[in-house]
Image: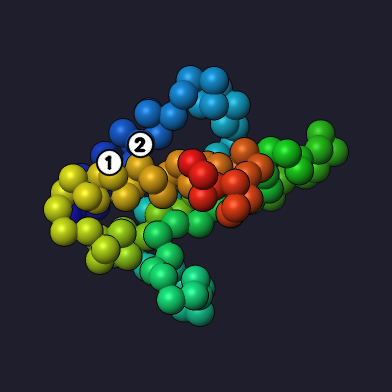
Amino acid sequence: MNRERFTELVREAMDSLPQKFRERIQNFAVVVEDYPPQGADHGEDLLMGIFEGTALTEKSTWDVQAGPDRVVLYQTNIEAVCDTDDEIREEVRLTVLHEFGHYFGMNEEQLEDV
């Protein structure tokens, strides 16, 4: 899948977030990269995405941010576990929801139930 189409799927996933959550997202970037950086290990599973920043539940009005929080999606890894465009769409949606769960302060255990 070309990057433009993949990015469109990311936008669809972002637009599917409930309005009450989208309204709370501030100073945030969503980035698509091919692969995670060398050494970014996620056990035996491929890393589909990552949240980089400080969860809203841990932010203070006194914090000075160096830049926006961000979610990075790894296109090649997502494509590697999917056979069809519909599966890619669903994996992108699940990865976006998972990483935004971290932004909103959820841990891995809580995200398993989502």
Q: How is the image coloured?
A: rainbow
- Is there any visible trace of residue 99 in the rendered image? no
Q: Residues within 10 Å of mark 2 (few under 14, many from 20)?
A: some
Residue nearest the observer in this picture, 109 or 64 = 109
- Is there any visible trace of residue 47 in the rendered image? yes
Q: Secondary structure at mark 1?
A: helix
Q: Quadrant of residue 34?
A: bottom left
Q: What amino acid is at disc 2?
A: Ala
Q: What amino acid is at disc 1?
A: Leu
Q: Name the residue at 22% across, 50% down.
A: 87
Marks 2/1 in contact by CB < 8 Å: the verdict is: yes
Q: Name the residue at 26% across, 63% down.
A: 81
On-image quarter of the N terminus: bottom left
User: Left of 7 or right of it: where is 18?
Assistant: right
Q: Please give the residue where the numbered disc 2 appears in the rendered image.
A: 13
Residue 77 image label: none
Q: Please give the residue where the numbered disc 1 appears in the rendered image.
A: 9
